Image: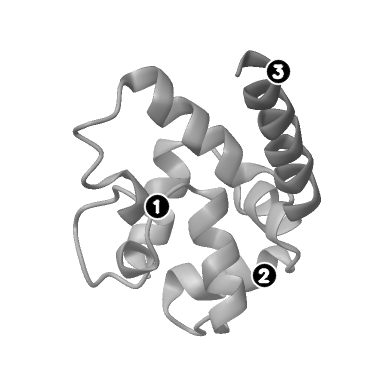
Amino acid sequence: MENLRKIRERQNKSQVNVAVNIGVAQEMISSYESGKAYPKADTLIKMAKYLETSTDYLLDLTDDPTPIRLYNKSNLSEAEINLLIKYSKLAIEDQIKLAGYLDALSYISN
């Protein structure tokens, strides 16, 4: 998983930082980067979300680090894309709260 090391370093994040944020030991990040171990699917997904990249990139299946959710957004403005990125980082409970707030705002404006 050479790309894991590349994107981590590009974002100036340490192995410890990544490990703490996805809930694994720093030694596991080191093992992933050296190819001595491979993460479980749920851990891989957490890494991809935290590092804002695709699982394919982390698995060295592509050289493009762009997250899939950012493809085909040509009809969205930069502000809209930034909002979607922020929304995707929220916990599910907070996404539900935000959806309720947006529903309330749209009801008021109609």
- Amino acid under label 3? Ile
Number of other residues with Cα within 10 Å of mark 2, as a class: few under 14, some 14 to 19, many 20 or more: few
Of the two numbered discs 1 and 3 on the same chain, state the one appearing first in sequence: 1
Quick one: quadrant of the C terminus? top right
Q: Is residue 84 left or right of residue 58?
A: right
> Disc 2 designates what residue?
27
Q: Nearer the viewer, mark 1 or mark 3?
A: 3
Query: Residue at (50%, 83%) from the top-left corner?
Result: 38
**As rendered, which of 36 and 91 lies closer to the eye?**
91
Q: Which mark is residue 53?
A: 1
Of the two numbered discs 3 and 2 on the same chain, state the one appearing first in sequence: 2
Tag 3 near tag 2, CB within 8 Å: no
Q: Which mark is residue 39?
A: none
Q: Is residue 18 left or right of residue 68?
A: right
> Disc 3 designates what residue?
108
Of the two numbered discs 2 and 1 on the same chain, state the one appearing first in sequence: 2
**As rendered, which of 51 and 12 lies closer to the eye?**
51
Q: Is residue 31 above or below residue 5?
A: below
Q: Position of residue 99 (x, y in %)?
A: 68, 40
Q: Nearer the viewer, mark 2 or mark 1?
A: 1
Query: Residue at (48%, 36%) from the top-left corner?
Result: 84
In whole angstroms, how far apart are the C-alphas of marks 2 and 1? 21 Å
- Amino acid under label 2? Glu
Which element type, helix, strand or loop, lies under badge 2?
helix
Q: Is residue 71 above or below residue 33?
A: above
**As rendered, which of 102 and 95 lies closer to the eye?**
102
Q: Nearer the viewer, mark 3 or mark 2?
A: 3
Q: Position of residue 30 (x, y in %)?
A: 56, 67
In whole angstroms, how far apart are the C-alphas of marks 1 and 3? 37 Å
Q: Is residue 40 left or right of residue 84?
A: right
